[in-house]
Image (tube, grey):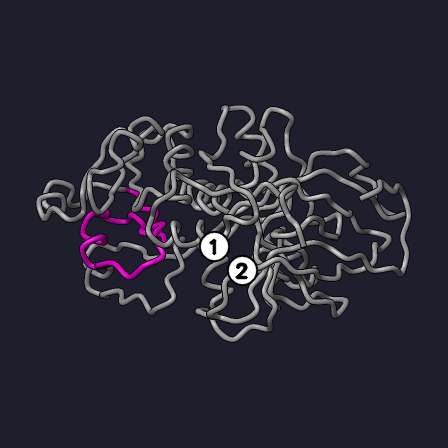
Amino acid sequence: MAAVTATSNTTTTTARAVGAGSPTADLAPLQIERRALGASDVRIDIKFCGICHSDIHFARGEWGEIPYPAVPGHEIAGVVAAVGSDVTGFAVGDRVGVGCMVNSCRECENCQAGNEQYCIAGNTQTYGSVDRDGTFTYGGYSDHVVVDQDFVLRIPDEIPLEEAAPLLCAGITTYSPLRHWNAGPGKQVAVVGLGGLGHMAVKFAHALGAEVTVLSQSLRKQEDGLRLGADHYYATSDDATFTALAHRFDLIINTVSAVIDMGAMLSLVKTDGALVNVGAPSEPLPVPVFPLLMQRRTFAGSGIGSIRETQEMLEFCAEHGIAADIEVISADQVNEAWERVLASDVRYRFVIDNSTLTA
């Protein structure tokens, strides 16, 4: 796309994309319309987009009915191509990213407190939402996107764009609870699952100074876990794990998007410790009450971070040399990549090279 500076207009733009036409359809090339560049908007040429398990849940209608075509993707890294007349923080050529949200009400208590990710009216998701101007949002499996400047992030030069993309979801989704629950020196932190989210949680917890344990179904990824920064690695398929680690952890971050034995996991939490779910299974997750009551444990959920916290996370990554472990694919490999995500056959995040879009 041609670069345009300090302008706004009423002309929509056509984007090349990959999307699904129904819950059971494969993803295929298509074209979508992006809204016209507004005065406070930034138009971004998308260079890379990470593949998140949420993309699959969404496109297959597993979290509820959605309109089609569905174009997922909320781990967007690219370069500014145009800015609206009121944009002050970005210029053409800047390296930028977009995560899981592109707007919020900006008026509620949470938005006013800088927690727009928890907007009481609901933040506007990067895909599958109706924005405040009435336009429908499509995600980053496309060649460009138009986003309000307040929801655009600056990617530090130290982080390659393709490795930065997954930080905009997998990164902030794990960084935020680790910060909120004060992971750091003297704390015992466990990470359940070593996938796209889990591998980032291990890197962050280690960089924050905590003693880190990975809890995975098997020891298949043990070597990776230790390389990424874990101090210990246990298989949850072994009953002895739960005996050896009883009452061990100040904080457990559960990253898996499947139903697991929450009672067993809670038994590993110290008195006054917390088990925090960041994975989002499509089925209800039964949580027994007595393990909570008897040790004053907390079971909590955590979503993404705010824009401020996400920018903080990106700067933290630049300072500590942290990025996602990725496998770059072309757009025509997305269907295969989704199947591999479901089979846990990726180490540890697929990233689409958006220059390969052909629609």
Residue at (27% x, 36% y) in the render: 221
Which amino acid lies under the numbered mark 2 shown in the image of this protein? Answer: Leu
Q: Which mark is residue 27?
A: 2
Image position, residue 179 (x, y; %)? 46, 40
User: Is 262 colored magenta in this rendering?
Assistant: yes
Residue at (55% x, 43% y) in the render: 330
Q: Which residues are magenta?
A: 250-277
Label 1 – label 2 distance at C-alpha: 6 Å
Image position, residue 135 (x, y; %)? 73, 67
- Image quadrant where one finds the C terminus: bottom right
Does 199 sit left or right of 237 as displayed?
A: right
Residue at (36% x, 35% y) in the render: 202
Q: Are marks 1 and 2 in contact (CB under 8 Å)?
A: yes
The local crowd at label 1, few if under 14, some if 14 to 19, many if 20 or more residues have their Cα within 10 Å, is some
Q: Which residue is mark 1?
A: 335
In this orientation, which residue lies closer to the viewer: 16 or 218? 16
User: Is 130 colored magenta in this rendering?
Assistant: no
Does 116 sit left or right of 55 as displayed?
A: right
Which amino acid lies under the numbered mark 1 shown in the image of this protein? Answer: Asn
- Please tell me whether mark 2 sits on a helix, a strand or a loop: loop
Give the residue furthest to the bottom.
Answer: 65
Q: Quadrant of residue 14?
A: bottom right
The local crowd at label 2, few if under 14, some if 14 to 19, many if 20 or more residues have their Cα within 10 Å, is many
